[in-house]
Image: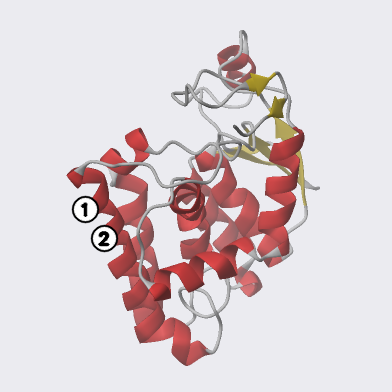
């Protein structure tokens, strides 16, 4: 029986991007159900799949798993050959640590730089708290790359694309869209993520969506469904 992943809009739903891009990169087949967020009836529609009332939700037969990191752990157990976590125990521990830190932290960055792929790419002034989050994430990426990624011979945090990369994929979008200052190592990592076919598929689909929500970019006009850069 095919897996089904219930997600929000590809333009806005950072949490949905995580399991989606992990499954695509790992070659795990699934059907998707897209529920537009911030629309009348969105909450009721999501509640049909999970009483938690949030996306993403993975449906496996008569079983539902919700929350992005729980879904990634479920998939790693369900598909052990997919390599979502590194095989080396120390690398795996670090991958889980940095993923958990992303899952529970960086609130200033989340609040100030929401994921919105339609926004024009440009540098925007940020608070010291946001810049501190950026510096911490940059350091995490550089540490993973130096200790394991480069040695494994691949461009991602631990060599090949895995669960930790999926957890940080929305951050890549935020850093890129908002022009946040990063090191050369972090920029190279971001470029590698955005060069994947899975990223491109998600991005292209986001550009075709017709749902919009209020945003804080007064200089950026919108025609419904068609973002127009100033």
Numbered mark located on residue 135 in the image:
2
Q: Residue furthest top?
A: 40
Quarter-of-image position of residue 207: top right
Residue found at the very far right of the displayed protein = 1
Element type at mark 1? helix
Please say if 12 is above or below 73.
Answer: above
- Left or right of 175? Residue 58 is right
188 versus 193 height, above or below: below
Q: Nearer the viewer, residue 29 or 22?
A: 22
Query: Where the C terminus falls, by quadrant?
Result: top right
* Residue 46, quarter of the rendered image: top right
Please state which of residues 216 and 61 is positioned toward the viewer in this rendering.
216
Residue lying at 34% horizontally and 63% vertically, measured from the top left? 98
User: Is 225 situated left or right of 160 in this image?
Assistant: right
Residue ID at (56%, 17%): 38
Residue 192 x %, y %: 58, 70
Can you say whether 60 is above or below 146 in the image? above
- Residue 61 visible somewhere in the drawing: no
Residue 136: where, in percent of width, then height?
25, 60
Q: CA distance from mark 1 to mark 2?
A: 5 Å
> Which residue shows up at 61% across the image and 61% down it?
194
Tags 1 and 2 touching, CB below 8 Å: yes
As drawn, which residue projects farthest toward the front?
230
Nearer to me, 178 or 196: 178
The residue at which mark 1 appears reads as: 132
Disc 2 crowd rating (10 Å Cα; few below 14, some 14-19, many 20+) is some
Q: Secondary structure at mark 2?
A: helix
Q: Position of residue 22 (x, y in %)?
A: 61, 58
The answer to whether any part of residue 160 appears in the image is yes
């Amino acid at each position: 029986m095919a897996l089904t992943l219930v997600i929000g809009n590809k333009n806005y739903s950072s949490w949905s991007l995580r399991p989606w891009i992990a499954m695509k990169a790992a070659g795990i087949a699934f059907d998707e159900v897209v529920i537009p967020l911030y629309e009348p009836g969105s909450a009721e529609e999501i509640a049909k799949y999970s009483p938690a009332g949030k996306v993403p939700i993975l449906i496996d037969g008569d079983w539902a798993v919700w929350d992005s990191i729980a879904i990634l752990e479920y998939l790693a157990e369900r598909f052990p050959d997919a390599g979502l976590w590194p095989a080396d125990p120390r690398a795996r521990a670090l991958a889980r640590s940095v993923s958990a830190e992303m899952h529970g932290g960086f609130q200033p960055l989340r609040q100030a730089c929401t994921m919105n792929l339609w926004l024009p790419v440009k540098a925007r002034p940020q608070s010291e708290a946001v810049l501190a989050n950026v510096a911490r994430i940059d350091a995490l990426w550089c540490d993973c790359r130096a200790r394991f990624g480069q040695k494994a011979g691949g461009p991602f945090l631990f060599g090949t694309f895995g669960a930790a990369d999926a957890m940080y994929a929305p951050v890549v979008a935020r850093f890129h869209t908002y022009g946040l200052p990063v090191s050369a190592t972090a920029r190279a990592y971001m470029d590698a993520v955005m060069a994947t076919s899975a990223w491109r598929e998600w991005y292209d689909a986001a550009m075709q969506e017709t749902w919009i929500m209020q945003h804080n970019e007064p200089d950026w006009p919108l025609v419904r469904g068609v973002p127009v850069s100033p």
